[in-house]
Image: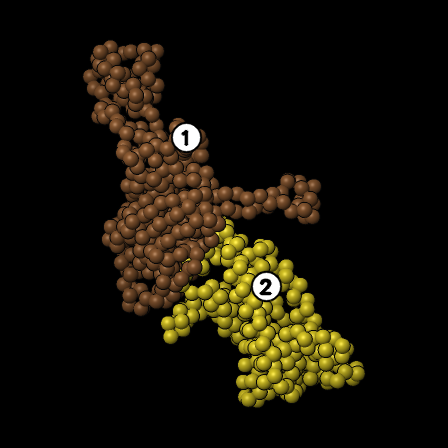
């Protein structure tokens, strides 16, 4: 369906010093430098998969999507999408894909969405009847039928995104490249778009590659994630396994029977929160069994619960471009090891 | 047939879009009324009797120039430049139709919407200069309409070719400003070309510009014009420009970084 082999993209950008002297110097002697946006990326996505694509700003997510949709030419490696080389942009290929970019619109600003949809219907060679039927169907799924006769500029951001999705999906593409489709939307609008994407994927068996900075999008929609860091793919696997690999800790929640000082609690692990007798500790996975045994012995809690840290907490540093707990290299190494077999793990809860 | 349906949809929506802003359209039509100003200047000059055109012929020439200019206005380079800089070209590239057809549809639609304003300006000129009103005949009108269409296509091809420089330098419209000087001077927009020194006329003949305005304007005022030869020159320039544009387009797309998108 979609395979990427050693894909890379290097941009050549002007290197100009600030100020008037920098401008004058740049006028006569141009300097450029190469920026490796994506480097040696490999992955494969099967038909119908819903895959999340994670990484900090500038990690290479959008560049990869642009290469896969045929907008830009790769500097190295190759990509095959449904058997097509994307950059050739054959019409048969374009009819099977779509690229939705959050905050970027294809709809004509001053006209109602229906006018833009009329163009899309014709350009994608749908009969008038077929176009009407699909507009009705997608409009219903998106709860957007009442928006289609209002000029786009009069719609809210969330309403506009619904219309954008309708326009992007009118030709019923098999592959959806979604670049932060919920960016800037309020929580209700985000939820509405998420729910639509889920139903679309289920109803039409479409393959989806989604980038988002909202972890709720990823956790609600994607069972598999790709993580890109500084242009390199550092993780490809199940979302559930990602947090295990990214953090060496587990969350231990306790309900104490008697009050205990913070100092004592800190001897069991990192104290995350304390609310009366309710305590949350972060405990190293390697020490988990011993620590729990000590907690039962010394604190005698009335309740104890162990679970993975929330994915948002785990991925926060990654999405902010900060150094990872294990570092991307070790994450990649763990990934390589996992190809042989998942490391055994302590399961307490 | 499938292509015609696609183009018809582009044209239909472009027409709706153009007519949404009626006041803006009227202002654009008025902004192209430079020939009316030049008409007054040359009318006075012709009155002195030293020119080969009578004052009324001069008025008719500039009425023809006015119509031709209005019907061959091209702004694709600015539209394309904005598309590249703001990343809107990305959406156009992902549709199974070449972006040029959208630009052409926008131009055609604007032409249709602008036509009533142009007719009003023509009647205004005839009213301002009594005795200048004339009708060249249906045959001449049809030939002139075909030449004006050819002129528009050549002008569009020239500007669209220059627009591909946007892939290398985002400010390609500065090239158009340079080209517009040559166009203004050598097309007959400022004055009938046969009033220019012979050497300038010879130089102009090697460019496409005299065939864009001067030739159809002469035809409209009843002068003899070799329509077939004019078409051949326009056709040759257009074909050459299309070949150059397609080559530059292909090269340029390899550099396109879809910035802003």
Determine whether label 1 and label 2 are within 8 Å by CB.
no
Residue A144's disc number: none
Name the foreground residue: B93 vs A333.
A333
| A174 and B36: which is toward the camera | A174
Indicate the position of residue A346 as horizontal and vertical percent values: 25, 24
Going 54% across and 81% down the picture, which residue do you hit?
B146
- Residue A214: give x, y in percent of width and height: 37, 39
Visual hue assigned to chain A: brown
Is label 1 in a helix, a strand or a loop? loop
Percent x, y of residue A315? 37, 33
Vertical order, B60 against B244 (above or below): below
Q: Chain of mark 1?
A: A
Compared across the picture, whether B127 is left or right of A48 comes to right
- Quarter holding residue B152: bottom right
Marks 1 and 2, how far apart in space? 48 Å
- The colour with which the image depicts chain B is yellow
- Between A307 and B106, the one lying in front of the other is A307
Do tags 1 and 2 sit on the same chain?
no
Residue pictured at 69% horizontal, 75% vertical: B204
Disc 2 target residue: B162
In the rendering, which numbered label is found on residue A327? 1
**Looking at the rendering, in which quadrant would you find the C terminus of chain A?**
top left
Mark 2 packing: few (<14 Cα in 10 Å), some, or many (20+)?
Answer: many
Tell me which residue sits at (77%, 83%) in the image: B51
Answer whether residue B135 is visible to the viewer in this image: no
Residue B197 visible here: yes
Element under label 2? helix
Query: Residue A235 or A243: which is nearer the viewer?
Result: A235
Q: Is residue A123 left or right of residue A303?
A: right
Q: Residue at x 25, y 13 (%)?
A: A294
Residue A73 position (above or below residue B44) = above
């Amino acid at each position: 369906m979609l395979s990427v082999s050693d894909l890379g993209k290097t941009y050549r950008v002007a290197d100009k010093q600030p100020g008037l002297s920098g401008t004058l110097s740049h006028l006569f002697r141009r300097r450029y430098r190469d920026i490796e946006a994506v480097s040696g990326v490999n992955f494969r996505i099967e038909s119908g998969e819903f895959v999340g694509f994670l990484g900090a700003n500038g990690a290479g997510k959008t560049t990869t999507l642009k290469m896969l949709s045929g907008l830009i030419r790769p500097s190295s490696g190759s990509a095959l999408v449904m058997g097509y080389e994307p950059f050739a942009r054959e019409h048969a290929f374009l009819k099977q894909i779509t690229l939705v970019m959050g905050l970027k619109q294809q709809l004509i600003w001053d006209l109602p969405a229906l006018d833009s949809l009329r163009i899309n219907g014709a350009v994608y060679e749908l009969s008038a009847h077929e176009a009407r039927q699909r507009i009705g169907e997608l409009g219903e799924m998106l709860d957007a039928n009442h928006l289609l006769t209002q000029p786009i500029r009069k719609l809210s951001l969330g309403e506009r995104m619904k219309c954008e999705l309708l326009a992007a999906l009118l030709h019923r593409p098999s592959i959806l490249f979604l670049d932060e489709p919920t960016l800037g939307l309020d929580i209700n609008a985000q939820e509405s778009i998420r729910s639509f994407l889920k139903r679309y994927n289920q109803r039409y068996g479409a393959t989806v590659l989604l980038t988002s900075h909202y972890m709720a999008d990823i956790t609600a929609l994607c069972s598999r994630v790709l993580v890109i860091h500084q242009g390199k793919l550092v993780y490809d696997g199940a979302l559930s396994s990602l947090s295990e690999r990214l953090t060496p800790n587990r969350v231990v929640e306790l309900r104490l029977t008697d009050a205990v000082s913070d100092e004592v609690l800190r001897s069991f692990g990192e104290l995350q929160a304390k609310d009366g007798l309710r305590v949350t500790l972060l405990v190293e996975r390697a020490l988990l069994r011993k620590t729990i045994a000590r907690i039962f012995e010394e604190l005698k809690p009335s309740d104890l619960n162990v679970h993975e840290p929330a994915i948002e907490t785990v991925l926060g540093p990654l999405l902010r471009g900060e150094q990872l707990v294990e570092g991307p290299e070790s994450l990649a190494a763990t990934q390589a090891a996992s190809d042989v077999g998942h490391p055994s793990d302590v399961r307490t809860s | 047939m499938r292509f015609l349906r696609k183009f018809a949809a582009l044209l239909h929506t472009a027409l709706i879009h153009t007519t949404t802003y009626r006041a803006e359209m009227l202002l654009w039509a008025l902004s192209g009324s430079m020939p009316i100003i030049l008409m007054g200047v040359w009318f006075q000059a012709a009155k002195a009797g030293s020119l080969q055109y009578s004052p009324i012929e001069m008025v008719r020439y500039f009425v023809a120039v006015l119509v031709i200019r209005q019907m061959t206005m091209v702004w694709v380079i600015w539209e394309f430049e904005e598309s590249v800089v703001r990343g809107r070209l990305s959406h156009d590239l992902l549709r199974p139709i070449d972006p040029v057809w959208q630009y052409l549809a926008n131009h055609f639609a604007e032409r249709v919407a602008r036509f009533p304003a142009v007719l009003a300006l023509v009647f205004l000129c005839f009213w301002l200069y009594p005795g200048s009103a004339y009708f060249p005949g249906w045959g001449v009108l049809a030939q002139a309409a075909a030449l004006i269409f050819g002129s528009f296509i050549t002008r569009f091809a020239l500007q669209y070719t220059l627009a591909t420089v946007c892939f290398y330098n985002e400010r390609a419209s500065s090239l158009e400003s340079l080209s517009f000087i040559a166009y203004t001077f050598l097309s007959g927009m400022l004055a009938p070309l046969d009033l220019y020194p012979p050497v300038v006329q010879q130089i102009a003949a090697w460019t496409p510009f005299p065939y864009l305005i001067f030739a159809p304007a002469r035809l409209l005022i009843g002068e003899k014009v070799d329509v077939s030869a004019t078409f051949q020159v326009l056709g040759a320039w257009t074909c050459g420009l299309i070949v150059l544009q397609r080559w530059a387009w292909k090269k340029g797309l390899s550099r396109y970084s879809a910035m802003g998108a």
